[in-house]
Amino acid sequence: MKLFTLSIFVIAYFFFIWKKQYKAQVCWVACAVLFLFGIIRFSDIFTIINWNVLGIFWGTLVLAQLFSLSGVPAYLANILVVKAKYVNWAILSVCLVAGAISVFVENVATVLIVAPIALAIAQKLKVNPVPFLIGIAISSNLQGAATLVGDPPSIILAGFAKMNFNDFFFLSGRPSIFFAIELGALASLGVLYFVFRRNKERVGVVERAKVTTWIPTFLLGFMVLSLVGASFLGSSIGHRLSVNLSGIICMVFGFIGLMWHELTGLGVRKFNRGKLGSTLFHDIRILDWETFFFLAGIFLIVGSLTKAGIIDDLANFFIRFAGDSRLMAYLAIVWGSVFFSAFVDNVPYVLAMLPVVRSLALGMEMSPSLLYFGLLIGASVGGNITPIGASANVVACGMLKRNNYTVGFIQFIRIGLPFTFFAVLASSTFIWLVWR
């Protein structure tokens, strides 16, 4: 049974890499096979799938898309650009804005928000925009790990480890993952400066972006404040409600955003040429059901590995490899995650590795948080090495291709690899010093 379950997982993972556009369909075909052979049952849908994570993901994604349609992110990026005298500082400013937005907005949405500004600057000055968009994509991927709502791996970790919004800043009285990621951002900023150091053309006049509405910004801000407030309630409202409260909050604000959109029609004229009757419920860019169901299916596939005992076997392997050295165990999790995430989707990887990390920590009698944070750093930042390592990278390369620019695999690695190395080194060192 173990061999069969593992084979299903490996085959599904292979198709995730080879046929990314069909990953949700592949995922549920694998789930159907697991159901057919009795490895997982219908009742597991309610126990294995983390519905709190799905609630956070859906609500945040809706508000992120409304936020991008409002024009506020582009407006904020423009403010920084017009203050910069030279292209290199303008692009560094845009990368910083992309990182700041990605703290609260999903990475792909961040790239779609910020990249057009970099393309406009590059076109105006007749310079190659390839390194600019690579910088925006990898900056977004890094900062997405800083908060609970920044990226799916962070959301998954929060659901698995029962972490609330505030725990990403301070956990058990110690500085948490947010400060590690910001330290990594500072370290990697030097890499981006080195990449853009020769772009000293003057920026000139850049047309200001117009803000359509500030309502999505307020909704996003109130959602974050509500998540912070809910973090203080804890067990006082009951364990079941406390565990699922973050998902409920995000879904409520997502629903409010949907209803507001239906009443005002934000973005309908822009994307549908003013046709009446076009609603947000039909806009796949906002209601990304494919990713939603892919995430739900991955929970079931990884749950089958746990039920078959494969997760425990993998944890025992790590324990034997590390011996008595906590440092070796930590380094294996961090840099192993960097390597794997350079080539595979970090969502199924994180879901598969979290139970392994917990078992490893318990077996070595060490704090699970140390390995949780190491896993999140490696899996989130490792995708920056290659153009296929993260969805934001794929989107950035696609935008360049539509503008008749080709991104070479080696060209991407020349920027992504040093960026990743220094970001992971600084972030993981901070976590080790604080949590060892």
Image: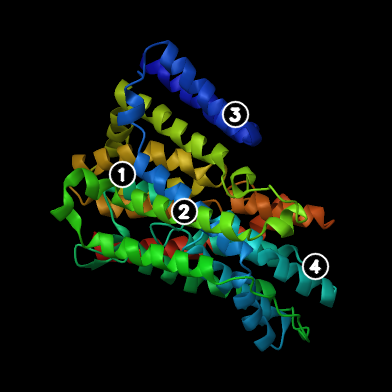
* Marks 1 and 3 in Cβ contact (< 8 Å): no
Q: Earlier in the sequence, mark 2 or mark 3?
A: 3
Q: Quadrant of the N terminus?
A: top left
What residue did someone put label 2 on?
Answer: 254
Q: Amino acid at mark 4?
A: Asn
Q: Earlier in the sequence, mark 2 or mark 4?
A: 4
Q: Nearer the viewer, mark 2 or mark 3?
A: 2
Residue at x 46% of width, y 22% of height: 31
Mark 2–mark 1 Cα distance, whole angstroms, equals 22 Å
Helix, strand or loop under label 1: helix
Q: Circle 4: is it few (<14), some (14-19), or many (20+) Cα within 10 Å?
A: few
Choose between 425 and 168: the one closer to the eye: 168
Helix, strand or loop under label 3: helix
What residue did someone put label 1 on?
Answer: 160
Choose between 328 and 222: the one closer to the eye: 222
Residue 225 image point, x, y percent: 35, 67
Q: Amino acid at mark 3?
A: Phe
* Marks 2 and 3 in Cβ contact (< 8 Å): no
Mark 4–mark 1 Cα distance, whole angstroms, equals 43 Å
Q: Nearer the viewer, mark 2 or mark 4?
A: 2
Write down the quadrant of residue 171 in the picture. Answer: bottom left
Mark 1–mark 3 Cα distance, whole angstroms, equals 26 Å
Disc number for residue 15: 3
Choose between 420 and 45: the one closer to the eye: 45
What residue did someone put label 4 on?
Answer: 128
Q: In screen coordinates, is 5 left or right of 163?
A: right
Q: Circle 1: is it few (<14), some (14-19), or many (20+) Cα within 10 Å?
A: some
